[in-house]
């Protein structure tokens, strides 16, 4: 069995979701398995049209900081989160949605990007995946 | 045996690594994947991925900041 990375995407901040996606893609590219578990603020990013909506975790300045960072990222050639999430799926990555967050925040399946989500689950699924993972991260 | 060319010139992390992996997944056993790029860390990291995947690194060349890595699936 391949080595595995399990990542909890708890934050919905743009820079942190980027980190989660980049690490997930890197793991898949290096021959590992990868699961991304979206919970709480992170799950907001899986809402339809929500992927790029997160603020910057620091110096967001009502969106001005985010705009500046995004402009710089574009110049450097960083790809979009949509591209990263599509690559993640293509390379066999698994995206999981926390159903408790869905209940708390009144999010229905049809509000989410069902095309991306492999399963809807809770802490037990995270732990059964994490206990057999070489690496697990909380972002 | 086919030779698959991947151009990642101007791309940054994690695209060269991801595109290399995509090409290797599509390649058949014995095919050669040639990746061209400019992102400095990827020149070091693609060989790490090749090793982790148990594939054969054929050669690495660099000229004027542009590197070429050849891998046999």
Image: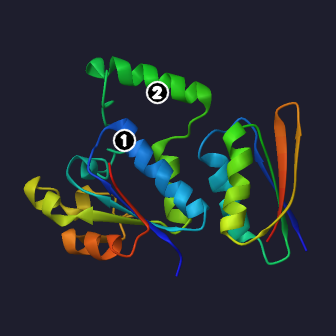
Above or below, A53 against B14 in this view is above
- Label 2 sits on a secondary structure element that is helix
Q: Name the residue under label 2.
A: A70
Q: Which chain carries label 1?
A: A
Decide if residue A111 is on the left or right side of residue B42: left
| Residue found at x 67% / y 51% | B45
Q: In this view, does B51 lie above or below B65?
A: below
Q: Which colour scheme is used?
A: rainbow
User: What is the C-alpha distance between the residues marked 2 and 1?
Assistant: 14 Å
The x, y position of residue A79, in whole percent, is 55, 40
Residue A131 is marked as none
Mark 1: which secondary structure?
helix
Q: Which chain carries label 2?
A: A
Q: Please say if B30 is above or below A137.
A: below
> Closer to the N terminus: mark 2 or mark 1?
1
Specify whether A118 is left or right of B71.
Answer: left
**In which quarter of the view is residue B52 placed?**
bottom right
Query: Residue B51: x and y, percent?
Result: 71, 65
| Residue A11 x/y as whole percent | 27, 45
Give the image quarter of residue A124. bottom left
Between A132 and A113, the residue placed more toward the observer is: A132
């Amino acid at each position: 069995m391949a080595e595995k990375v399990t990542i909890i995407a708890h934050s919905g901040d743009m820079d942190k979701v980027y980190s989660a996606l980049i690490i997930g893609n890197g793991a898949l590219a290096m021959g590992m398995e990868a699961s991304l578990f979206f919970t709480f603020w992170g799950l907001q990013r899986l809402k339809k049209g929500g992927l790029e909506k997160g603020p910057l975790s620091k110096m967001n300045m009502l969106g001005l900081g985010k705009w500046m960072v995004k402009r710089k990222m574009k110049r450097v050639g960083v790809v979009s989160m949509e591209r990263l999430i599509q690559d993640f799926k293509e390379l066999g990555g698994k995206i999981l949605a926390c159903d408790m967050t869905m209940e708390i925040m009144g999010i229905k399946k049809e509000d989410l990007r069902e095309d991306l989500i492999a399963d809807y689950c809770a802490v037990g699924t995270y732990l059964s995946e994490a206990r057999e993972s070489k690496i697990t991260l909380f972002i | 045996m086919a030779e698959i060319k991947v151009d990642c010139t101007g791309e940054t992390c994690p695209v060269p690594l991801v595109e290399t992996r995509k090409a290797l997944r599509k390649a058949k056993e014995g095919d050669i994947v040639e990746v061209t790029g400019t992102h400095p860390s990827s020149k070091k990291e693609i060989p790490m991925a090749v090793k982790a995947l148990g594939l054969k690194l054929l050669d690495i060349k660099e000229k004027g900041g542009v590197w070429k890595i050849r891998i046999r699936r």
